[in-house]
Image: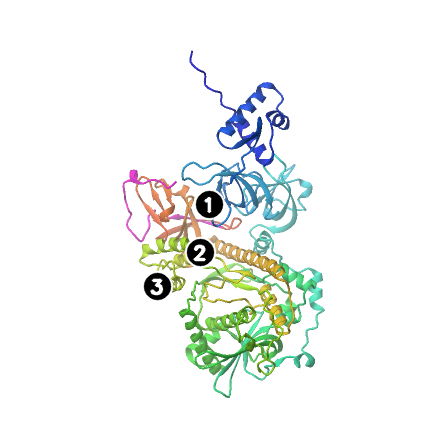
Amino acid sequence: MAKSKKKQPKRYLFEEVLAFLKHNDGKSFNYKQLGAAMEIDNESDRFALLETLEELKHQGFVIETDIGKYAAKESKTYQTGTIDFTTQGTAFVIISPDVPDVFIPFKRTKDALHGDLVKVFVHPQHGRGKAEGEVVEVIQRRKTKFVGSIQINPKFAFVVPDYTKIHVDFFVPLENINGAKNGQKVLVEMTEWKRGSENPNGKVIDVLGNSGEHETEINAIMAEYGLPMTFAPEVEAAAKKLATEITPEEIAKRRDFRGITTFTIDPHDAKDFDDALSLQKLENGNWEVGVHIADVTHYLKPHTILDDEAVSRATSVYLVDRCVPMLPEVLSNFACSLRPHEEKYCFSAVFELDDHAQIQNQWFGKTVIYSDHRFSYEEVQTIIETGEGPYKDEIFTLDRLAKILRAERTSKGSIFFDKAEVKFQLDDAGAPTGVYFKTQKDAHKLIEDFMLLANRKVAEFLGKKTKDSSTALRDQKGQPKKDKNDKGSDAVVYRIHDVPKDEKLMELNNFVERFGYSVAVGNKMKTAQSINKLLQDVKNKKEQSMIELLAVRSMPKAVYTTKNTGHYGLGFDYYTHFTSPIRRYPDVMVHRLLEAKLNHTHYLKADELELLCKHSSEMEKLASDAERASIKYKQVEYLEDKIGQEFEGVISGVTEWGIFVEIIENKCEGRVSMRDMKDDQYSFDEDNYRVVGRKTGRIYTLGDKVTIKVRRADLVKKQLDFEFVSGIPSTKEVEIRNPKRYKKRR
């Protein structure tokens, strides 16, 4: 008689038992206890349960802790990380830079949402494939408020999120729609996610307006990132109560620069002027350059309602059509702003430079200034180029000194990213009528060089411990003053930028080699020099935009911290942010730290500063994301009336779901969906940044110049859809190879 096959446990039971044990990580159960907990009450199912436990033990998912007692296997099978959803509903859990991401299949994400901190069970790996797992617990929600469009039915409503990575809709009872009308854009707050339910419950907490309207969409962007659009009445009231007049008593405490030529250089539409430059020639032939920064901390006192609000916001947010300031207008645009022909309080870094821009002396302290002129960048650039205009001699001198400082930075490994910024011409209703690009010219670089000098020297003064560091302390007349009480123990707020990882640089090098360029790997200085050469070599080439983007992406993000590791991109051992306290809270902290050192007092402990640094870095990222979202919205709006029009573009991204193309003339980026490429069946070749047609061998590669047609412009999703006009890259002949020899990367 043939031996009967062992009956395999039911799959659902396998998964349920495993899930139960994972949720009770570290606890042991016998099969009867498990049966009772899982409400298994008949003998046949209990026997199946016992078989399932044995199978789980055999496969390595559980261990038998004692005779007849089972627990989830304790190993590296559980990991904690941030979940990153794809638009298809699958996800990856990012553990750490040194641990591979864990792939989470569809329906194995439990009740997690994009960005949540989650605990995952990692399945035993077989072969070299990607690690795969499932979410077992949401440890911390990244956010609970989401922007979306409301769909109202007779008995209930749903909010469909704008952000495509939020893969579920929110169920909203009619009593919780807060007066919203069908199709309107709203802010919904998640209230609960019942076990076993496919959708979380929510309530509408704000009605933003009608979808597609300019003001609605801008408000929606801010709400999506949790950024406030307005100040609370009590904050505005506190700002209006501040004493903002310039008094003789306060002037007497400060170094007086009112008789020295001083001016500001800013964008033509700026309202908050937080820095000014002064210049005078000294009797010894050297130049005294004053970098004067708005003295925000004179008005913004710690632990006040205004300071708490500034801490919360941490940064001003610059959208396409407006600035949402960190400080109320009373401070940002009036009291603190270094407006022309007005006396203002400043915190200044003053440098004595010789004709070769070498620092002979430096001084830090509180000042009072009078701005003689308000320049735009364009006006200063005209003076530099034509040799004519107000204060031309001062402009020439500052430009010459700045260029020497810049050359010195370059020689010491500073990397110069000079990517053009996309700007829009807007009509009175906020609709885009044109696109232009903001590039850095000598006028911008002049200001940048002196701001970098001030930031670097303030960081060195606060953090660098040398025998002669006390010579930086000087009295109101600029004479040396020794700090006898400096114990060298105070923490400092730094702006750091880590060295890029070799793997990232190798990826960049592998790509640029296709275009005949190279990037040195291994030596910091040689790497910086090779990147600078690369950025120069690609100027005005079709691949410029894409290589610049990839070069930026190869770099780690700059952050605020009390732990100094230097700033790789600038080539500085010490660096901080001192020059923009109107729009950045870290600069406010640095002002307070500098004042504390000058006055032999203390500001905050290291752990308190570190928390504020971390918060400021996080808010900076949110503000940057919001800015990009507003640009993307305007790009979609700009192309909304250009459906069917053709444009030349460059392939800027390749994924398994589609090809991204950036239009050359306006920098608008859209996607050609793989599903819409009907001429062939394409496979994604991740290693080579391309997709390949399985039948024809047709190749679309990152950097290819192509012709596209605008297919769709979706304002709600902020998404542009393109299609290839000719179906083939326009810059090269179609590459045909034996399709049988091509294998998709697994």
Q: Which residue is drawn at 71% across and 65% down?
A: 237
**Residue 553 marker:** 2
Q: Residue at x 58, y 26 (%)?
A: 68
The quarter of the rendered structure image containing the C terminus is top left
- Decide which of tag 2 and tag 1 comes sooner along the chain: 1
Is 303 situated above or below 392? above
- Decide which of tag 3 and tag 1 comes sooner along the chain: 1
- The magenta segment is 719-746
Give the x, y percent position of residue 122: 50, 39
Residue 56 appears left or right of 346:
left
Which secondary structure is most common in the magenta stretch?
Answer: loop
Q: Which residue is drawn at 41% across and 59% down?
A: 548
Give the x, y percent position of residue 523: 39, 61
Colour mapping used in the image: rainbow
The quarter of the rendered structure image containing the N terminus is top left
Q: Residue at x 52, y 48 (%)?
A: 717
SS at badge 1: loop
Residue that carries the numbered disc 3 in the rendered image: 537
Residue that carries the numbered disc 1 in the rendered image: 100
Label 1 Cα crowd, 10 Å radius (few <14 / some 14-19 / many 20+)? few
**Residue 116 marker:** none
Which residue in the rendered view is the most extreme toward the front?
66
The amino acid beneath tag 3 is Asp
Is 640 situated above or below 271? above
Residue 42 appears left or right of 279:
right
- Decide which of tag 3 and tag 2 comes sooner along the chain: 3
The amino acid beneath tag 2 is Arg
